[in-house]
Amino acid sequence: MLSRRFFLSAGGATVAALAMPRMVFARANTSRRFVFIIQRGAADGLSILGPTGDPLHAGLRESFDQGLQNGAKLDSFFTLHPALAESAKMYAANQALFVHAVASPYRDRSHFDGQNVLETGGSAAYQLRDGWLNRLLGLLPAGESKALALSDTVPMALRGGNQVSSYAPSKLTGPSEDLLQRVAALYEPDQQLHALWSEAVATRTMAGGVEADGLNGAAIGSVAAKLLAGENGARIAMIETNGWDTHSGQQGRLAAQLRNLDGIIGSMRTGLGVDWANTLVIVATEFGRTARPNGTGGTDHGEGSLAMLFGGAVAGGKVIADWPGLSTAALYEGRDLKPTTDLDSLIAGALAQQYALEPARVMTTLFPESRGTAFAKPLIA
Amino acid sequence: MATPDSAIALNRFGLGARPGDAPPADPKTWLTAQFTRFEARPQALAKVPSRSAVIGQLADYVAQLRMDGRSKRRAQPTSLSAGAPPQADAQPDPLKRFLRQTIRDDYLTMNAARLSSALTTDNPFAERLVYFWANHFAVSVDKLPVIGLAGLLEFEAIRPHLFGRFSDLLIGVEQHPAMLVYLDQAQSIGPNSEIGRLAAMRGGKQRGLNENLGREIMELHTLGVRTGYSQADVTEFARALTGWTVSGLARGPAARFIGGGDDGSFTFAEALHEPGDRVIMGKRYPQQGEAQARAILLDLAANPATARHISTKLARHFSSDDPPQPLVDRLTRAYLASGGDLPTVYRALIDSPEAWAPKPLKFKTPWEWSVSALRAVGQRDIDPQAAAGMLNQLGQPTWKPGSPAGWDDIAASWAAPEALMRRVEIAQRLASKAGSSVDARALAQKVLPGEVSDATRTAIARAESPQEGLALLLVSPEFVRR
């Protein structure tokens, strides 16, 4: 019985690159649910929600993102990646909202530092020692909540003075596809290790790959829903997804990543039942990727990206974007989508509305270094 | 200031750097200082089960087995006449199960203590030598009676003699209950001994001489295979060894003959000893009793073939799978000139340029890799079940090499595709446990001072999360070798 604030971290290496998504939950005395899904590795917002209506899009990305031809047209400007089928249905049902050209205050291109800013809510890496999701707990009526620690680590966003504990299914998962690829690259110049590794990977592929020993997105979403649903369910959860760093082979890898993400969200909606109506899910990444594809069928580290909001609580069915344009002059440093919306403000605004809290207080508690103000546009129905 | 030699001292001679370890300014002095600093019984080993406790559990277990055997024999006619198979094995006796589990727990506790000692020691070179000798004098826990004793062999017979003479180490090991039980010496009976003659008169089960320990001492522990001893020498040595046994293992009438206490200590049982002189490799041993085998062991320890055998293995461990001949020669000379004084041999090794060659020379065994990875992430102890599980998964369960020859000390035995995949899996798990608080970019410089290649540095820096960066560090080419 989940009568206490708790945290869950579920392992799962899955098809292609969505590696070891992990979940974290905390309970607070409210019927509203909030789930934060972090996309570690810098997800390519331009591929996930393509600005197909921008006249420069075709020149930059038409052949690279040809998959978008089969995606759902959300409006005259934006097309959703076809792997996000459940998400598109939610958009049609006004339960999904997208915010484009968004970014945290971080303007460099290191994953570690970028994730630290995204999770701590500071304006620079390692400036704050606790996470904004933990500080959010302090704003909510906590009831009799205490921590339940079962295993694994608490991600930065949830670390801090408010108690949170962790749980991971006992089944150990295989290494992520992304890690396997990086190990392959690392061993490339080493004759002995390269030969051994090639053979190991070949055997693994023959045996059915990592899919067999990990949980797929839908399974993770179901586990999350079970732990969030009902009177005694958790109120706050965090799910970590890895594998978004698509420097090469982006089309296939990103599609697999998105299928899993879509699975997590789809099965959470199903599993939560009536509680879905009170649920807000925010999906965000540390930064975006270059507007132009690189020479290896992928994209490199960039700036502006995409944030996604899902849930019965969301005032969905729209895309919010102060679109910066794709001309070289309009791109950040001539290469990346320029951030025009502040992710901190978006998160603070959405949470203030979700929990009926004073927006300025949410902003200063969660993002104390920010000079921005919480998003005032209606995000929650 | 980190020099190439300080990294070699930490990683090739030691067990891998911990985040707080400063690279030794004078690597050779850092190594030799460990000779005197070494603790035979550090805090990490303080709580391992005692020998008398382990022996007591074992004796109870064996007694229980005997009792089962007797009642099964009595029950058999009935079950046969009823046409049903004997039921005795279908429901394992709860007492037997309890004893098995107790013995298994001893093993887990000792393995975790060993690992904890490896993670907390400030004398990693000395600890590495412990593992070297434990593998040289290998016992294997796939024999049930050895499960609870294997760790004690290392803690009680090897550690105290680590910086003494080889002959003392040798005698300490051969008189330890783990070795006496593992290589069947405890049950070896001289055919003309008091008990041997008694057994022959009764015409009972064929019991007598067991050559196992005598052979392995010559082949594995001292001279080395094909170094001039014959089958006749092995048999003579086995005869000399009769009477070397363990107190407290036998219950009932047999205990009377063995004597001694019931604490598992070495005991010489005159009633089992083959009387008479022995002749081995042309030399006559007129000594009687325990002194006879002891005199033979001293001669074996002083034999040049033993010096060469030990030197070759040490050279292989610290220089390369195919050890350079000049290094082996130098260690052999040091051994012989000092009468098998181990610190003298270790010093010769430390002073040899072959052991300081800059490129990593050895592919880490699973034990070495696990210890270095856990040290790198700053872990100080580990859950006993998790420790055993990890080493099992990596293919090197502690004290279970499967044969008295021990684990191989060459890359070909460890560098295999699936084994590498296992390391990547465990690296990911360790990294995920360490969380995002560890910055692998900084850690790499600390644990591999001056040794991080550009490729590894770049791979870590480009990793998509701190955890992935740490996992990559732990499986990098620099880190899987030493």
Image (tube, grey):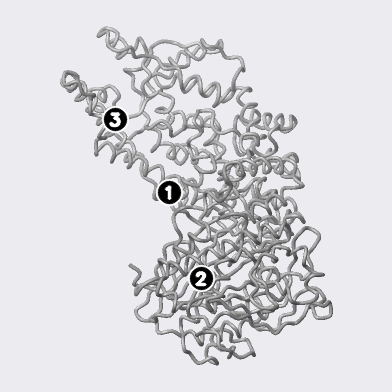
Which marked residue is nearer to the observer: mark 2 or mark 1? 2
Q: Position of residue A260 (x, y in %)?
A: 56, 61
Q: Residue furthest right?
A: A329
**Would residue A101 be seen by someone viewing this image from the given angle?**
yes
Which marked residue is nearer to the observer: mark 3 or mark 1? 1
Identify the residue position indicated by label 1 in the image.
B385
Q: Is residue B68 left or right of residue A157?
A: left
Q: Position of residue B457 (x, y in %)?
A: 73, 58
**Would residue B20 be seen by someone viewing this image from the given angle?**
no
Disc 1: which chain?
B
Q: Position of residue A145 (x, y in %)?
A: 37, 77
Neighbour tally class for label 2: few under 14, some 14-19, many 20 plus, Cα within 10 Å? many
Q: Report the front residue among A154 and B129.
A: A154
Disc 3: which chain?
B
Task: Name the residue at 59% across, 41% down.
Answer: B419
Q: Which mark is residue B62?
A: 3
Q: Is residue B245 left or right of residue B42?
A: left
Query: Relative to B129, is A349 above or below?
Result: below
- Work out which quarter of the rendered image holds the C terminus of chain B and state it: top right
Dot 1: element: helix
Q: Tell me the distance, in whole angstroms, between the alpha carbons under discs 3 and 2.
A: 54 Å
Q: Position of residue A324 (x, y in %)?
A: 75, 82
Identify the residue position indicated by label 2 in the image.
A238
Task: Name the residue at 56% across, 55% down.
Answer: A14
Q: Amino acid at mark 3?
A: Val
Q: Earlier in the sequence, mark 3 or mark 1?
A: 3
